[in-house]
Image: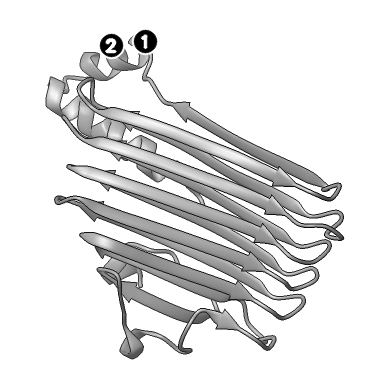
Amino acid sequence: MWDEFNIKTFPAETVVFRDGVFCPELSTIQGTDFYHEYDKPIHIIYIGEITGNNRLDINIFTNNQKIFLSAKIKNKKPAFLNIFIKNSGKKSEFRGKVLLENSNTLNFDCTGEHENSENMILLKTKLLAHKNSISKLSGVAVINKNCKNVTSDISFSALAEKTARIEFSPSQRISSVPKTADHSASIYQPTIQQIEYLRETGLSGAEVKDVLHEAFINDFSLF
């Protein structure tokens, strides 16, 4: 997966999507409805360029299962992506990282719903918003009744060109006492000191921008 997708892998069952389409030849299991416990963690890889409406449903019905999502997505035409995670497994863990690179109009919506106790849904999204792009990112964490001691975090951060437009909308619906429940949205701005340091090394303005983009993207460890 590293050679083709620049995605770090580990011993796991894999479910791979390229350009929004499931790739059975790269996957060890099919589908994203998990009804029984696997001996290995599950790694969902969602990669490529999307357009139009796209949806990824992840349903966890078994206990003690670890599931990871690595998503790296670009769009050059208007696109919408919805990711819905439902965790009904006790002590099952979902950890996801989504990297969005928007060059046009992008709507991203994510929902993390807890339906059992002591489980986890962590979904962190980074957005790289290019010139004149329009991005709308929304997310909701749902902690239902009788789902105590869960861990929940849906967060957004962005690095944007000056002419880019961004709208964040993180929210929570909490009906049980969680272990932790966080949500956040932030815009990353490089400091003057960082920019001056890079220029002093002999980099051009375009090269400085490329370095800052790479630093923002690469500071995104999944595990």
Is residue 183 in view from this perspective?
A: yes
Residue 31 as seen in the image, left or right of residue 117:
left
Q: Position of residue 131 (x, y in %)?
A: 16, 30
**Few, some or many C-alpha atoms within 10 Å of disc 1 (few <14, some 14-19, many ≥20)?**
few
The residue nearer to you, when weighing 206 against 116, is: 116
**Few, some or many C-alpha atoms within 10 Å of disc 2 (few <14, some 14-19, many ≥20)?**
few
Q: Quadrant of the N terminus?
A: bottom left
Residue 139 in the image: above or below residue 203: below
Amino acid carrying mark 2 in the image: Glu
Q: Position of residue 13 (x, y in %)?
A: 53, 83
Residue 169 in the image: above or below residue 119: above
Q: Secondary structure at mark 1?
A: helix
The residue nearer to you, when weighing 74 against 143, is: 143
Measuring 46% from the left and 60% from the top, which residue is drawn there?
A: 83
Is residue 129 in view from this perspective?
A: no
Q: Secondary structure at mark 2?
A: helix
Measuring 29% from the left and 16% from the top, which residue is drawn there?
A: 195
Measuring 34% from the left and 9% from the top, which residue is drawn there?
A: 192
Residue 66 in the image: above or below residue 119: below
Would you say the residues marked 2 and 1 are in contact, meaning their CB atoms lie under 8 Å apart?
Answer: yes
Q: Position of residue 28 (x, y in %)?
A: 46, 89
Which quarter of the picture shows residue 162? top left
Measuring 40% from the left and 85% from the top, which residue is drawn there?
A: 27
Residue 147 as seen in the image, left or right of residue 6:
right
Q: How many marks?
A: 2
Amino acid carrying mark 1 in the image: Gln
Which quarter of the picture shows residue 119? bottom right
Disc 2 marks which residue?
196
Q: What colour scheme has been applied to the protein in the rendered image?
A: one colour
Disc 1 marks which residue?
193
Which quarter of the picture shows residue 209? top left
